[in-house]
Image (tube, rainbow, N blue to C red):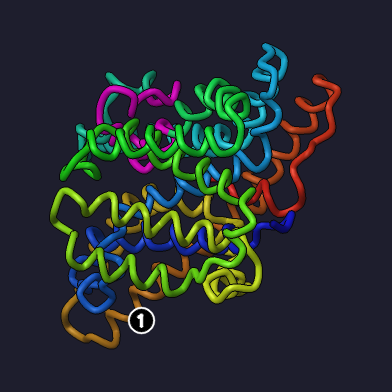
């Protein structure tokens, strides 16, 4: 397996974009009915599960062997590096949403108290909002970051167990654990508690990484298997086997993107997809504030339905502005703060950075 996982970076970019379109299809672009003529986006609510699988894979790729022996120093280093990656932009978007809500209250403008819940603000700042509910407060896509934060906290323990068991036994335990969680979620898996989804997805990602140790994986015909999974999904979706089939399909795509040369991986290393992957964290976290602010302005200033062509142009411009703002946030805030924090953390622990180029951009 190569050191640069550009296929996974591209996959993450497309996944983030599909989540954005799914949410924009609710507001402000609901009249465009994007999911009707692009059915792929109907599954936008499940795309977050791809993030969890990718994250489990990448974190294992970079850090699994760090926990052959558990130590407070190793755990502390890992947790601080993860915080440096996800927290600065996350907390900035929460503060932005609080400021916008406070302004709306002072100006007697409408706001959604279920999302802007001041009683759960501390919960949100601690990234624990999804540990006991759906977590849809303040910057609502942040629920998945809350769930992923939980996975980071338990990863050292899981990694230590997996490494201790060995490759085959570790893979078997991961299969059983992920399968049990998916079965527990049942037909309502994608509406179940976020920690069920995040843990199952993370374990599947770890499983995919474990499978890379097997030489036979390199010769797997990924495209036929992916097509077979889609065919099975058409029959199982809406049944209790639907979530399992979809997650198997997502896992196949993730595994394929980890290996160079196959058709699936070549699709996602397309440069625009790869760059979407680089800015995907910014895109994912800022699209809800954009939806709440610029989306409302758009609905006030533009009457959809008068001209289909004009509606398409306006919708395209709105999406373009969103991606452009994500680029600017990534370039001027996310990347500099991450680098600055890592430069302070790594010397303290007197360890080399360790993550190969391109890998750290493939996080969720």
Q: Give the x, y percent position of residue 28.
A: 26, 62
Depth check: give the residue in front, 238 or 28.
238
Q: Give the x, y percent position of residue 67.
A: 67, 24
Depth check: give the residue in front, 239 or 78.
239
Residue ID for mark 1: 313
| Residue 123 belongs to magenta span | no
| Residue 142 belongs to magenta span | yes
Against 158, residue 52 (above or below) is below
Depth check: give the residue in front, 1 or 53.
1
Please give the name of the residue rendered at 37% of the width and 54% of the height, measured from the top-left corner.
248
Magenta segment = 124-147
Asked if one can make out residue 268 in the rendered structure from this viewpoint, the answer is yes
Hey, which residue is sitting farthest top in the picture? 72
Depth check: give the residue in front, 286 or 63.
63
Determine the image quadrant of residue 225: bottom left
Q: Quarter of the image for the N terminus: give it.
A: bottom right
Against 272, residue 138 (above or below) is above
Indicate left or right for 312 with 286 as reference.
left
Indicate left or right for 169 with 350 as reference.
left
Secondary structure beneath dot 1 equals helix
Determine the image quadrant of residue 236: bottom left
Indicate left or right for 206 with 316 as reference.
right
Please give the name of the residue rendered at 66% of the width and 26% of the height, measured from the top-left corner.
78
Q: Give the x, y percent position of residue 98.
A: 38, 32
């Amino acid at each position: 397996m190569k050191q640069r996982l550009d296929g996974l970076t591209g996959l993450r970019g497309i996944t983030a974009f599909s989540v954005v379109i799914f949410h924009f299809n609710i507001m402000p672009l609901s009249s465009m009915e994007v999911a009707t003529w692009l059915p792929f986006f109907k599954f936008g609510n499940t795309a977050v599960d791809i993030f969890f699988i990718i994250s489990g894979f990448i974190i294992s790729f970079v850090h699994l062997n760090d926990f052959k022996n558990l130590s407070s120093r190793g755990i502390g280093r890992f947790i601080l590096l993860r915080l440096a990656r996800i927290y600065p932009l996350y907390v900035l978007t929460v503060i932005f949403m609080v400021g916008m809500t406070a302004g709306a209250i002072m100006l007697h403008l409408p706001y959604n108290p279920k999302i802007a819940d001041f009683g759960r603000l501390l919960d949100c700042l601690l990234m624990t909002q999804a540990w006991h509910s759906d977590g849809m407060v303040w910057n609502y896509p942040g629920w998945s970051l809350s769930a992923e934060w939980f996975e980071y906290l338990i990863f050292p323990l899981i990694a230590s167990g997996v490494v201790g068991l060995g490759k085959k036994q570790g893979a078997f335990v991961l299969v059983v654990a992920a399968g049990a969680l998916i079965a527990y979620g049942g037909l309502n898996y994608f509406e179940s508690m976020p920690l069920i989804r995040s843990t199952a997805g993370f374990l599947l990602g770890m499983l995919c990484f474990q499978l890379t140790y097997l030489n036979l994986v390199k010769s797997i015909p990924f495209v036929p298997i992916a097509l077979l999974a889609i065919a099975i999904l058409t029959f199982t979706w809406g049944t209790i086997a639907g979530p399992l089939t979809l997650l198997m399909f997502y896992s196949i795509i993730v595994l394929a993107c980890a290996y160079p040369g196959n058709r699936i991986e070549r699709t996602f290393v397309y440069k625009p997809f790869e760059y979407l992957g680089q800015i995907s964290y910014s895109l994912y976290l800022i699209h809800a504030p954009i939806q709440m602010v610029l989306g409302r302005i758009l609905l006030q200033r533009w009457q959809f339905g008068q001209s289909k062509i004009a509606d398409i142009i306006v919708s395209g411009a709105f999406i373009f502005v969103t991606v452009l703002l994500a680029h600017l946030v990534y370039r001027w805030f996310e990347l500099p703060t991450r680098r600055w924090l890592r430069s302070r953390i790594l010397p303290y622990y007197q360890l080399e950075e360790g993550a190969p180029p391109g890998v750290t951009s493939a996080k969720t």
